[in-house]
Amino acid sequence: MWSQVYDPLGSMVLSTVVAALPIVVLLGAIGVFNIRAHIAAVLGLVAALAVAIFAYGMPVHMAGLAAGYGAAFGLLPIGWIILNVIFLYQLTNEKGEFAVLQRSISAISDDRRLQLLFIAFCLGAFFEGAAGFGTPVAVTAAMLIGLGFTPLAASGLSLIANTAPVAFGALGTPIIALSAVTGLDLYELSAMVGRQLPFFSVLVPFWLVWAFVGFRKMMEVWPAILVAGVSFAIPQYLVSNFHGPWLVDIVAAIVSMASLALFLRIWSPAAPMTAMPVGAESGDPAVPTPLPQRDAPAAVRRAWTPWLVLSLFVFLWGVPQIRAALDGVWVAKMPVVGLHEQVEKVPPVVAAAHTEAAVYTLNLLSATGSGILLAAIVSGFFLGYSAGGMVRMYLRTIYLVRYSLLTISCMLAIGFVTRYAGTDATLGLALANTGWLYPFFGTLIGWLGVALTGSDTASNVLFGGLQKVTAEQLDLSPVLMASANSSGGVMGKMIDAQSIVVASTATRWYGHEGSILRFVFFHSVALAVLVGLFVMGQAYVWPMTLLVP
Protein backbone atom coordinates (compact mmCIF):
# COMPACT_ATOMS: atom_id res chain seq x y z
CA MET A 1 0.00 0.00 0.00
CA TRP A 2 1.15 3.54 -0.79
CA SER A 3 -0.01 6.61 1.17
CA GLN A 4 -0.45 9.94 -0.56
CA VAL A 5 1.81 12.83 0.43
CA TYR A 6 0.50 16.32 -0.23
CA ASP A 7 3.68 18.31 0.46
CA PRO A 8 6.43 16.09 -0.95
CA LEU A 9 8.94 18.94 -1.33
CA GLY A 10 8.61 20.25 2.23
CA SER A 11 7.18 23.54 0.99
CA MET A 12 3.55 23.96 0.05
CA VAL A 13 4.50 26.68 -2.42
CA LEU A 14 6.98 24.48 -4.28
CA SER A 15 4.73 21.41 -4.05
CA THR A 16 1.82 23.42 -5.47
CA VAL A 17 3.94 24.70 -8.36
CA VAL A 18 5.08 21.16 -9.21
CA ALA A 19 1.54 19.78 -8.85
CA ALA A 20 0.31 22.38 -11.36
CA LEU A 21 2.85 21.37 -14.05
CA PRO A 22 0.58 18.87 -15.88
CA ILE A 23 -2.16 21.53 -16.14
CA VAL A 24 0.31 24.16 -17.33
CA VAL A 25 1.73 21.80 -19.95
CA LEU A 26 -1.70 20.70 -21.20
CA LEU A 27 -3.44 24.08 -21.32
CA GLY A 28 -0.30 25.90 -22.43
CA ALA A 29 0.19 23.50 -25.33
CA ILE A 30 -3.43 23.92 -26.42
CA GLY A 31 -4.10 27.57 -25.63
CA VAL A 32 -0.71 29.23 -26.15
CA PHE A 33 1.22 27.11 -28.63
CA ASN A 34 -1.78 25.83 -30.62
CA ILE A 35 -0.52 22.25 -30.51
CA ARG A 36 -3.10 19.74 -31.70
CA ALA A 37 -5.15 18.43 -28.81
CA HIS A 38 -4.13 14.78 -29.00
CA ILE A 39 -0.42 15.72 -28.96
CA ALA A 40 -0.99 18.21 -26.12
CA ALA A 41 -2.83 15.51 -24.19
CA VAL A 42 0.08 13.09 -24.57
CA LEU A 43 2.50 15.80 -23.37
CA GLY A 44 0.25 16.52 -20.40
CA LEU A 45 0.10 12.81 -19.56
CA VAL A 46 3.89 12.53 -19.66
CA ALA A 47 4.14 15.52 -17.32
CA ALA A 48 1.54 14.03 -14.94
CA LEU A 49 3.35 10.70 -14.80
CA ALA A 50 6.72 12.41 -14.22
CA VAL A 51 5.34 14.52 -11.36
CA ALA A 52 3.56 11.53 -9.79
CA ILE A 53 6.57 9.25 -9.93
CA PHE A 54 9.55 11.53 -9.37
CA ALA A 55 8.10 14.31 -7.18
CA TYR A 56 5.37 12.47 -5.25
CA GLY A 57 7.05 9.08 -5.07
CA MET A 58 4.13 7.13 -6.49
CA PRO A 59 5.21 3.61 -7.49
CA VAL A 60 5.70 3.34 -11.24
CA HIS A 61 3.28 0.45 -11.70
CA MET A 62 0.54 2.31 -9.80
CA ALA A 63 1.01 5.42 -11.91
CA GLY A 64 0.80 3.35 -15.08
CA LEU A 65 -2.30 1.52 -13.87
CA ALA A 66 -3.98 4.83 -12.95
CA ALA A 67 -3.27 6.13 -16.45
CA GLY A 68 -4.67 2.98 -18.06
CA TYR A 69 -7.74 3.10 -15.82
CA GLY A 70 -8.38 6.70 -16.81
CA ALA A 71 -7.87 6.00 -20.50
CA ALA A 72 -10.42 3.18 -20.35
CA PHE A 73 -12.89 5.47 -18.59
CA GLY A 74 -12.29 8.03 -21.32
CA LEU A 75 -13.43 5.54 -23.96
CA LEU A 76 -16.39 4.25 -21.95
CA PRO A 77 -18.55 6.04 -20.98
CA ILE A 78 -17.40 9.38 -22.42
CA GLY A 79 -15.94 8.51 -25.82
CA TRP A 80 -18.81 6.08 -26.38
CA ILE A 81 -21.28 8.96 -26.01
CA ILE A 82 -19.44 11.21 -28.44
CA LEU A 83 -18.99 8.52 -31.07
CA ASN A 84 -22.68 7.65 -31.14
CA VAL A 85 -23.98 11.22 -31.03
CA ILE A 86 -21.81 12.07 -34.04
CA PHE A 87 -23.05 8.89 -35.72
CA LEU A 88 -26.65 10.05 -35.33
CA TYR A 89 -25.74 13.50 -36.65
CA GLN A 90 -24.04 11.94 -39.68
CA LEU A 91 -27.11 9.84 -40.43
CA THR A 92 -29.46 12.83 -40.35
CA ASN A 93 -27.10 15.14 -42.20
CA GLU A 94 -26.54 12.66 -45.03
CA LYS A 95 -30.29 12.52 -45.73
CA GLY A 96 -30.73 16.29 -45.65
CA GLU A 97 -32.89 16.21 -42.55
CA PHE A 98 -30.80 18.88 -40.84
CA ALA A 99 -31.84 21.42 -43.46
CA VAL A 100 -35.49 20.73 -42.65
CA LEU A 101 -34.68 20.89 -38.93
CA GLN A 102 -33.03 24.27 -39.47
CA ARG A 103 -36.08 25.67 -41.21
CA SER A 104 -38.44 24.30 -38.55
CA ILE A 105 -36.46 25.98 -35.78
CA SER A 106 -36.51 29.15 -37.85
CA ALA A 107 -40.29 28.87 -37.70
CA ILE A 108 -40.02 29.30 -33.91
CA SER A 109 -37.73 32.24 -34.55
CA ASP A 110 -35.45 33.21 -37.42
CA ASP A 111 -33.40 35.32 -35.01
CA ARG A 112 -29.96 33.80 -34.44
CA ARG A 113 -29.88 34.95 -30.82
CA LEU A 114 -33.14 33.19 -29.99
CA GLN A 115 -32.15 30.04 -31.88
CA LEU A 116 -28.99 29.95 -29.77
CA LEU A 117 -31.00 30.47 -26.59
CA PHE A 118 -33.49 27.72 -27.40
CA ILE A 119 -30.94 25.10 -28.47
CA ALA A 120 -27.82 25.74 -26.38
CA PHE A 121 -29.49 26.77 -23.12
CA CYS A 122 -32.97 25.21 -23.01
CA LEU A 123 -32.49 22.02 -25.02
CA GLY A 124 -28.92 21.57 -23.78
CA ALA A 125 -30.18 21.63 -20.19
CA PHE A 126 -32.53 18.75 -20.96
CA PHE A 127 -29.69 16.58 -22.27
CA GLU A 128 -27.54 17.56 -19.29
CA GLY A 129 -30.28 16.53 -16.90
CA ALA A 130 -30.94 13.24 -18.67
CA ALA A 131 -27.41 12.13 -19.54
CA GLY A 132 -24.60 14.60 -18.79
CA PHE A 133 -21.02 13.48 -19.47
CA GLY A 134 -20.57 15.49 -22.68
CA THR A 135 -23.93 14.69 -24.25
CA PRO A 136 -25.41 18.24 -24.20
CA VAL A 137 -22.35 19.86 -25.77
CA ALA A 138 -22.07 17.16 -28.42
CA VAL A 139 -25.75 17.44 -29.39
CA THR A 140 -26.22 21.21 -29.23
CA ALA A 141 -22.92 22.05 -30.94
CA ALA A 142 -23.82 19.70 -33.79
CA MET A 143 -27.29 21.24 -34.08
CA LEU A 144 -25.90 24.78 -34.11
CA ILE A 145 -23.51 23.84 -36.90
CA GLY A 146 -26.47 22.41 -38.80
CA LEU A 147 -28.21 25.77 -38.40
CA GLY A 148 -25.30 27.60 -39.99
CA PHE A 149 -23.44 28.78 -36.90
CA THR A 150 -19.69 28.98 -37.33
CA PRO A 151 -17.53 26.35 -35.60
CA LEU A 152 -16.19 28.80 -33.01
CA ALA A 153 -19.65 30.12 -32.17
CA ALA A 154 -21.21 26.65 -32.03
CA SER A 155 -18.38 25.24 -29.90
CA GLY A 156 -17.75 28.11 -27.51
CA LEU A 157 -21.35 29.11 -26.95
CA SER A 158 -22.57 25.56 -26.35
CA LEU A 159 -19.85 25.30 -23.67
CA ILE A 160 -20.91 28.55 -21.99
CA ALA A 161 -24.55 27.47 -22.01
CA ASN A 162 -23.74 24.14 -20.37
CA THR A 163 -23.03 25.58 -16.93
CA ALA A 164 -26.06 26.29 -14.74
CA PRO A 165 -27.60 22.78 -15.25
CA VAL A 166 -24.39 20.80 -14.58
CA ALA A 167 -24.72 20.36 -10.80
CA PHE A 168 -27.99 18.44 -11.30
CA GLY A 169 -26.83 16.65 -14.45
CA ALA A 170 -27.38 12.97 -15.22
CA LEU A 171 -30.40 12.82 -12.89
CA GLY A 172 -28.60 14.49 -10.00
CA THR A 173 -25.48 12.32 -10.05
CA PRO A 174 -23.06 15.05 -8.82
CA ILE A 175 -25.20 15.81 -5.74
CA ILE A 176 -25.76 12.12 -5.01
CA ALA A 177 -22.00 11.51 -5.19
CA LEU A 178 -21.33 14.55 -2.99
CA SER A 179 -23.67 13.22 -0.33
CA ALA A 180 -22.04 9.80 -0.49
CA VAL A 181 -18.47 11.05 0.03
CA THR A 182 -19.27 13.66 2.70
CA GLY A 183 -22.00 11.89 4.65
CA LEU A 184 -24.09 15.07 4.50
CA ASP A 185 -27.83 14.88 3.97
CA LEU A 186 -28.75 14.53 0.30
CA TYR A 187 -31.81 16.76 0.55
CA GLU A 188 -29.92 19.52 2.38
CA LEU A 189 -27.23 19.52 -0.30
CA SER A 190 -29.82 19.54 -3.08
CA ALA A 191 -31.65 22.42 -1.44
CA MET A 192 -28.49 24.49 -0.88
CA VAL A 193 -27.30 24.11 -4.47
CA GLY A 194 -30.86 24.94 -5.48
CA ARG A 195 -30.52 28.24 -3.60
CA GLN A 196 -27.23 29.12 -5.28
CA LEU A 197 -27.61 28.24 -8.94
CA PRO A 198 -31.04 29.75 -9.83
CA PHE A 199 -29.51 33.24 -9.74
CA PHE A 200 -26.97 32.09 -12.30
CA SER A 201 -29.62 30.30 -14.32
CA VAL A 202 -31.09 33.77 -14.92
CA LEU A 203 -27.67 35.34 -15.53
CA VAL A 204 -26.19 32.71 -17.89
CA PRO A 205 -28.71 33.18 -20.76
CA PHE A 206 -27.94 36.92 -20.76
CA TRP A 207 -24.22 36.15 -20.58
CA LEU A 208 -24.55 33.64 -23.42
CA VAL A 209 -26.20 36.06 -25.84
CA TRP A 210 -23.85 38.87 -24.77
CA ALA A 211 -20.85 36.66 -25.57
CA PHE A 212 -22.39 36.00 -28.98
CA VAL A 213 -23.42 39.46 -30.19
CA GLY A 214 -22.41 42.04 -27.57
CA PHE A 215 -24.39 44.01 -25.01
CA ARG A 216 -26.44 46.26 -27.30
CA LYS A 217 -27.81 43.46 -29.46
CA MET A 218 -28.37 41.33 -26.37
CA MET A 219 -30.65 44.02 -24.94
CA GLU A 220 -32.77 43.91 -28.10
CA VAL A 221 -34.00 40.46 -27.05
CA TRP A 222 -33.91 40.83 -23.25
CA PRO A 223 -37.59 39.88 -22.74
CA ALA A 224 -37.07 36.47 -24.35
CA ILE A 225 -33.82 35.91 -22.45
CA LEU A 226 -35.54 36.77 -19.18
CA VAL A 227 -38.38 34.35 -19.93
CA ALA A 228 -35.93 31.52 -20.68
CA GLY A 229 -33.85 32.18 -17.57
CA VAL A 230 -36.62 32.77 -15.05
CA SER A 231 -38.72 29.85 -16.34
CA PHE A 232 -35.66 27.63 -15.79
CA ALA A 233 -34.58 29.10 -12.44
CA ILE A 234 -37.94 28.86 -10.67
CA PRO A 235 -38.49 25.11 -11.33
CA GLN A 236 -34.79 24.54 -10.57
CA TYR A 237 -35.28 26.07 -7.11
CA LEU A 238 -38.64 24.42 -6.43
CA VAL A 239 -37.72 20.88 -7.52
CA SER A 240 -34.32 20.93 -5.78
CA ASN A 241 -35.81 22.20 -2.51
CA PHE A 242 -39.10 20.30 -2.40
CA HIS A 243 -38.32 17.07 -4.26
CA GLY A 244 -34.61 16.36 -4.55
CA PRO A 245 -31.79 16.38 -7.11
CA TRP A 246 -33.07 13.77 -9.56
CA LEU A 247 -35.44 15.62 -11.93
CA VAL A 248 -34.28 19.22 -11.46
CA ASP A 249 -32.79 19.82 -14.91
CA ILE A 250 -35.36 17.82 -16.84
CA VAL A 251 -38.35 19.62 -15.32
CA ALA A 252 -36.67 23.03 -15.54
CA ALA A 253 -35.58 22.48 -19.16
CA ILE A 254 -39.03 21.38 -20.31
CA VAL A 255 -40.67 24.37 -18.59
CA SER A 256 -38.08 26.72 -20.09
CA MET A 257 -38.44 25.35 -23.63
CA ALA A 258 -42.23 25.51 -23.47
CA SER A 259 -42.23 29.00 -21.96
CA LEU A 260 -39.82 30.39 -24.53
CA ALA A 261 -41.65 28.80 -27.47
CA LEU A 262 -45.01 30.14 -26.26
CA PHE A 263 -43.58 33.59 -25.56
CA LEU A 264 -42.14 33.79 -29.08
CA ARG A 265 -45.64 33.25 -30.47
CA ILE A 266 -46.69 36.63 -29.08
CA TRP A 267 -43.40 38.53 -29.12
CA SER A 268 -40.57 39.04 -31.60
CA PRO A 269 -37.63 41.44 -31.66
CA ALA A 270 -38.06 44.71 -33.49
CA ALA A 271 -35.01 43.97 -35.65
CA PRO A 272 -34.55 40.18 -36.05
CA MET A 273 -30.94 39.16 -36.53
CA THR A 274 -31.02 36.59 -39.33
CA ALA A 275 -27.29 36.68 -40.14
CA MET A 276 -24.28 35.62 -38.12
CA PRO A 277 -22.42 38.55 -36.54
CA VAL A 278 -19.06 39.62 -37.90
CA GLY A 279 -16.20 39.50 -35.41
CA ALA A 280 -14.34 37.35 -32.97
CA GLU A 281 -17.54 35.85 -31.59
CA SER A 282 -18.39 34.17 -34.87
CA GLY A 283 -14.93 33.52 -36.28
CA ASP A 284 -16.06 34.05 -39.87
CA PRO A 285 -17.86 36.70 -41.95
CA ALA A 286 -21.61 36.98 -41.65
CA VAL A 287 -23.56 33.98 -42.90
CA PRO A 288 -27.06 34.79 -44.19
CA THR A 289 -30.01 32.61 -43.36
CA PRO A 290 -31.13 30.46 -46.32
CA LEU A 291 -34.12 31.68 -48.30
CA PRO A 292 -37.40 30.88 -46.52
CA GLN A 293 -38.98 27.61 -47.53
CA ARG A 294 -42.08 26.09 -46.07
CA ASP A 295 -41.78 22.36 -45.46
CA ALA A 296 -44.73 20.04 -45.24
CA PRO A 297 -45.69 19.04 -41.69
CA ALA A 298 -44.77 15.44 -42.48
CA ALA A 299 -41.25 16.51 -43.50
CA VAL A 300 -40.85 18.51 -40.30
CA ARG A 301 -41.99 15.57 -38.19
CA ARG A 302 -39.55 13.34 -40.06
CA ALA A 303 -36.66 15.76 -39.41
CA TRP A 304 -37.42 16.00 -35.69
CA THR A 305 -38.08 12.30 -35.15
CA PRO A 306 -34.41 11.23 -34.72
CA TRP A 307 -33.88 13.89 -32.05
CA LEU A 308 -37.10 13.03 -30.26
CA VAL A 309 -36.06 9.36 -30.34
CA LEU A 310 -32.67 10.41 -28.96
CA SER A 311 -34.33 12.38 -26.15
CA LEU A 312 -36.52 9.41 -25.26
CA PHE A 313 -33.66 6.91 -25.19
CA VAL A 314 -31.37 9.24 -23.25
CA PHE A 315 -34.08 9.83 -20.67
CA LEU A 316 -34.84 6.11 -20.33
CA TRP A 317 -31.15 5.23 -20.00
CA GLY A 318 -30.88 7.82 -17.24
CA VAL A 319 -33.64 6.31 -15.09
CA PRO A 320 -31.92 4.45 -12.21
CA GLN A 321 -34.38 1.54 -12.30
CA ILE A 322 -33.79 0.94 -16.00
CA ARG A 323 -30.02 1.20 -15.61
CA ALA A 324 -30.18 -1.28 -12.73
CA ALA A 325 -32.30 -3.68 -14.81
CA LEU A 326 -29.83 -3.51 -17.72
CA ASP A 327 -26.90 -4.04 -15.34
CA GLY A 328 -28.82 -7.02 -14.00
CA VAL A 329 -28.65 -8.56 -17.47
CA TRP A 330 -24.91 -8.04 -17.83
CA VAL A 331 -22.22 -5.84 -16.32
CA ALA A 332 -18.56 -6.50 -15.64
CA LYS A 333 -16.89 -4.83 -12.67
CA MET A 334 -13.15 -5.33 -12.82
CA PRO A 335 -10.90 -4.23 -9.94
CA VAL A 336 -7.65 -2.74 -11.24
CA VAL A 337 -5.27 -5.17 -9.60
CA GLY A 338 -2.30 -3.34 -8.13
CA LEU A 339 -4.22 -0.08 -7.77
CA HIS A 340 -7.57 -0.99 -6.21
CA GLU A 341 -7.44 -0.21 -2.47
CA GLN A 342 -3.65 0.16 -2.67
CA VAL A 343 -3.57 3.98 -2.52
CA GLU A 344 -4.35 5.55 0.84
CA LYS A 345 -5.88 9.04 1.06
CA VAL A 346 -4.98 10.69 4.36
CA PRO A 347 -5.93 13.79 6.41
CA PRO A 348 -6.34 16.72 6.00
CA VAL A 349 -7.95 15.89 2.66
CA VAL A 350 -10.25 13.45 4.44
CA ALA A 351 -11.32 13.21 8.06
CA ALA A 352 -9.86 9.70 8.46
CA ALA A 353 -7.45 7.78 6.27
CA HIS A 354 -9.00 5.36 3.81
CA THR A 355 -8.01 3.49 0.68
CA GLU A 356 -9.14 4.52 -2.78
CA ALA A 357 -11.20 2.12 -4.87
CA ALA A 358 -10.25 1.46 -8.48
CA VAL A 359 -12.91 -0.66 -10.16
CA TYR A 360 -13.58 -0.32 -13.87
CA THR A 361 -17.23 -0.89 -14.74
CA LEU A 362 -17.84 -2.24 -18.22
CA ASN A 363 -21.56 -1.55 -18.48
CA LEU A 364 -22.15 -1.73 -22.21
CA LEU A 365 -25.89 -2.27 -21.79
CA SER A 366 -26.62 0.55 -19.35
CA ALA A 367 -24.08 3.08 -20.65
CA THR A 368 -25.70 6.27 -21.96
CA GLY A 369 -23.78 5.88 -25.19
CA SER A 370 -25.48 2.55 -25.81
CA GLY A 371 -28.89 4.21 -25.51
CA ILE A 372 -27.72 6.82 -28.00
CA LEU A 373 -26.49 4.09 -30.37
CA LEU A 374 -29.89 2.35 -30.24
CA ALA A 375 -31.58 5.71 -30.88
CA ALA A 376 -29.31 6.19 -33.90
CA ILE A 377 -30.08 2.70 -35.24
CA VAL A 378 -33.84 3.19 -34.82
CA SER A 379 -33.56 6.59 -36.51
CA GLY A 380 -31.41 5.16 -39.28
CA PHE A 381 -34.02 2.58 -40.22
CA PHE A 382 -36.71 5.27 -39.95
CA LEU A 383 -34.77 7.45 -42.38
CA GLY A 384 -34.42 4.62 -44.89
CA TYR A 385 -30.90 3.34 -44.27
CA SER A 386 -30.09 -0.30 -44.76
CA ALA A 387 -28.11 -2.20 -42.14
CA GLY A 388 -25.09 -2.17 -44.44
CA GLY A 389 -25.44 1.55 -45.03
CA MET A 390 -25.43 2.21 -41.30
CA VAL A 391 -22.35 0.01 -40.79
CA ARG A 392 -20.50 1.98 -43.46
CA MET A 393 -21.56 5.26 -41.87
CA TYR A 394 -20.46 4.02 -38.45
CA LEU A 395 -17.01 3.15 -39.77
CA ARG A 396 -16.77 6.61 -41.34
CA THR A 397 -17.74 8.12 -37.99
CA ILE A 398 -15.07 6.16 -36.14
CA TYR A 399 -12.49 7.46 -38.61
CA LEU A 400 -13.83 10.99 -38.18
CA VAL A 401 -13.49 10.99 -34.37
CA ARG A 402 -10.35 8.85 -34.07
CA TYR A 403 -8.13 11.65 -32.77
CA SER A 404 -10.87 12.90 -30.48
CA LEU A 405 -11.17 9.50 -28.82
CA LEU A 406 -7.39 9.37 -28.37
CA THR A 407 -7.42 12.86 -26.88
CA ILE A 408 -10.22 12.14 -24.44
CA SER A 409 -8.52 8.93 -23.29
CA CYS A 410 -5.31 10.83 -22.59
CA MET A 411 -7.22 13.64 -20.83
CA LEU A 412 -8.89 11.17 -18.48
CA ALA A 413 -5.59 9.37 -17.97
CA ILE A 414 -4.13 12.68 -16.74
CA GLY A 415 -7.07 13.19 -14.40
CA PHE A 416 -6.80 9.72 -12.90
CA VAL A 417 -3.02 9.96 -12.43
CA THR A 418 -3.32 13.29 -10.62
CA ARG A 419 -6.18 11.94 -8.51
CA TYR A 420 -4.40 8.79 -7.33
CA ALA A 421 -1.03 10.55 -6.95
CA GLY A 422 -2.58 13.25 -4.78
CA THR A 423 -1.43 16.22 -6.88
CA ASP A 424 -5.04 17.40 -7.23
CA ALA A 425 -5.32 17.41 -3.44
CA THR A 426 -2.18 19.56 -3.15
CA LEU A 427 -3.78 22.21 -5.35
CA GLY A 428 -6.98 22.02 -3.32
CA LEU A 429 -5.10 22.36 -0.02
CA ALA A 430 -3.31 25.43 -1.32
CA LEU A 431 -6.67 27.13 -1.85
CA ALA A 432 -8.01 25.79 1.46
CA ASN A 433 -5.36 27.65 3.45
CA THR A 434 -7.00 31.02 2.90
CA GLY A 435 -8.67 31.65 6.27
CA TRP A 436 -11.77 33.85 6.25
CA LEU A 437 -11.60 34.04 2.45
CA TYR A 438 -12.20 30.31 2.25
CA PRO A 439 -15.86 30.56 1.11
CA PHE A 440 -14.56 32.32 -2.01
CA PHE A 441 -11.54 30.11 -2.63
CA GLY A 442 -13.41 26.98 -1.60
CA THR A 443 -15.80 27.69 -4.45
CA LEU A 444 -12.80 27.95 -6.76
CA ILE A 445 -11.66 24.53 -5.55
CA GLY A 446 -14.80 23.12 -7.17
CA TRP A 447 -14.07 25.12 -10.33
CA LEU A 448 -10.52 23.75 -10.36
CA GLY A 449 -11.75 20.21 -9.77
CA VAL A 450 -14.05 20.25 -12.79
CA ALA A 451 -11.43 21.97 -14.95
CA LEU A 452 -9.04 19.14 -14.06
CA THR A 453 -11.38 16.14 -14.18
CA GLY A 454 -14.03 17.30 -16.67
CA SER A 455 -16.81 16.26 -14.33
CA ASP A 456 -18.72 17.91 -11.50
CA THR A 457 -19.27 14.44 -10.08
CA ALA A 458 -15.54 13.67 -10.09
CA SER A 459 -14.77 17.07 -8.55
CA ASN A 460 -17.26 16.41 -5.76
CA VAL A 461 -15.75 13.00 -5.09
CA LEU A 462 -12.25 14.47 -5.17
CA PHE A 463 -12.78 17.54 -2.99
CA GLY A 464 -16.07 16.94 -1.13
CA GLY A 465 -14.30 15.56 1.92
CA LEU A 466 -11.80 18.42 1.94
CA GLN A 467 -14.63 20.96 1.81
CA LYS A 468 -16.39 19.37 4.79
CA VAL A 469 -13.27 19.05 6.94
CA THR A 470 -12.06 22.59 6.20
CA ALA A 471 -15.50 24.11 6.80
CA GLU A 472 -15.74 22.44 10.22
CA GLN A 473 -12.27 23.70 11.17
CA LEU A 474 -13.23 27.27 10.17
CA ASP A 475 -16.67 27.10 11.84
CA LEU A 476 -18.47 27.37 8.50
CA SER A 477 -21.42 25.28 7.39
CA PRO A 478 -20.22 22.01 5.80
CA VAL A 479 -23.43 21.92 3.73
CA LEU A 480 -22.71 25.39 2.37
CA MET A 481 -19.12 24.65 1.38
CA ALA A 482 -19.83 21.17 -0.02
CA SER A 483 -22.60 22.71 -2.11
CA ALA A 484 -20.27 25.52 -3.18
CA ASN A 485 -17.89 22.87 -4.51
CA SER A 486 -20.59 21.68 -6.88
CA SER A 487 -21.96 25.13 -7.75
CA GLY A 488 -18.51 26.57 -8.38
CA GLY A 489 -17.58 23.50 -10.35
CA VAL A 490 -20.22 24.09 -13.00
CA MET A 491 -18.30 27.13 -14.26
CA GLY A 492 -15.19 25.03 -14.81
CA LYS A 493 -17.03 22.73 -17.20
CA MET A 494 -16.48 25.01 -20.20
CA ILE A 495 -12.66 24.99 -19.92
CA ASP A 496 -11.97 21.36 -19.17
CA ALA A 497 -10.05 19.88 -22.06
CA GLN A 498 -12.43 16.96 -22.41
CA SER A 499 -15.45 19.21 -23.04
CA ILE A 500 -13.48 21.36 -25.48
CA VAL A 501 -12.55 18.27 -27.51
CA VAL A 502 -16.19 17.13 -27.48
CA ALA A 503 -17.19 20.53 -28.88
CA SER A 504 -14.48 20.59 -31.54
CA THR A 505 -15.42 17.07 -32.63
CA ALA A 506 -19.15 17.83 -32.82
CA THR A 507 -18.44 20.90 -34.98
CA ARG A 508 -15.82 19.16 -37.14
CA TRP A 509 -13.30 21.75 -36.00
CA TYR A 510 -10.78 19.36 -34.51
CA GLY A 511 -7.35 20.95 -34.21
CA HIS A 512 -8.73 24.36 -33.17
CA GLU A 513 -9.11 23.59 -29.47
CA GLY A 514 -6.79 26.49 -28.61
CA SER A 515 -9.17 28.96 -30.23
CA ILE A 516 -12.11 27.50 -28.30
CA LEU A 517 -10.19 27.61 -25.00
CA ARG A 518 -9.20 31.24 -25.50
CA PHE A 519 -12.81 32.11 -26.35
CA VAL A 520 -14.33 30.58 -23.20
CA PHE A 521 -11.55 31.08 -20.63
CA PHE A 522 -12.53 34.59 -19.51
CA HIS A 523 -16.18 33.62 -19.23
CA SER A 524 -15.31 30.61 -17.07
CA VAL A 525 -13.12 32.59 -14.66
CA ALA A 526 -15.52 35.55 -14.43
CA LEU A 527 -18.56 33.38 -13.69
CA ALA A 528 -16.61 31.29 -11.15
CA VAL A 529 -15.58 34.50 -9.36
CA LEU A 530 -19.22 35.61 -9.24
CA VAL A 531 -20.27 32.28 -7.71
CA GLY A 532 -17.46 32.63 -5.17
CA LEU A 533 -18.62 36.11 -4.20
CA PHE A 534 -22.19 34.84 -3.87
CA VAL A 535 -21.05 32.06 -1.51
CA MET A 536 -19.06 34.64 0.49
CA GLY A 537 -22.31 36.55 0.85
CA GLN A 538 -24.12 33.44 2.03
CA ALA A 539 -21.42 32.82 4.61
CA TYR A 540 -21.04 36.31 6.05
CA VAL A 541 -23.51 38.88 4.69
CA TRP A 542 -26.95 37.33 4.45
CA PRO A 543 -28.20 34.13 6.09
CA MET A 544 -26.80 30.92 4.63
CA THR A 545 -30.34 29.61 4.58
CA LEU A 546 -31.42 32.27 2.07
CA LEU A 547 -34.67 31.22 0.40
CA VAL A 548 -35.24 28.31 2.75
CA PRO A 549 -38.62 26.67 2.05
Image (cartoon, grey):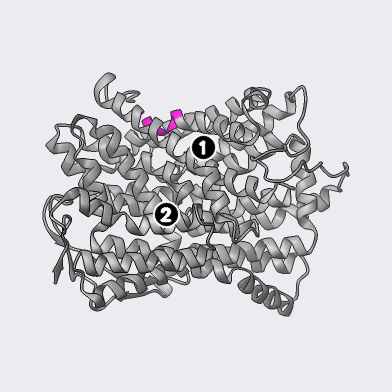
Q: As rendered, which of 380 and 164 lies closer to the eye?
A: 164
Mark 2 surroundings: few (<14), some (14-19) or many (≥20) residues within 10 A = many
In primary-sequence order, the first of circles 2 and 1 is 1
**Does 373 appear above or below 141?**
below
Q: Quadrant of the N terminus?
A: bottom left
For the residues labelled 2 and 1, say whether their Cβ atoms are less than 8 Å apart: no
**From what the image shows, is residue 467 above or below residue 462?**
above
Front label number (2 vs 1): 2
Which residue extends farthest front? 33
Is any part of residue 125 visible from this angle?
Answer: no
The disc at residue 454 is: 2
Observer-nearest residue: 547 or 72? 72
Tell me if 26 is positioned left or right of 138 in this view. Answer: left
Residue for badge 1: 252
Q: How many marks?
A: 2
- Quadrant holding the C terminus: top left
* Residue drawn at (31%, 49%) of the image: 460
* Secondary structure beneath label 1: helix
State which quadrant residue 345 falls in.
bottom left
Report whether 461 appears left or right of 11.
right
Residue 173 in percent (x, y) is at 38, 51
Q: Main secondary structure of the magenta part?
A: helix
Magenta region, residue range: 195-199
Mark 2 lies on a secondary structure that is: loop
Question: Residue 132, position in %: x, y?
Answer: 48, 53
Q: Nearer the viewer, residue 539 or 400?
A: 400
Percent position (x, y) of residue 169? Answer: 44, 48
Between marks 2 and 1, how big is the CA–CA gap?
A: 23 Å
The image quadrant of residue 331 is bottom left
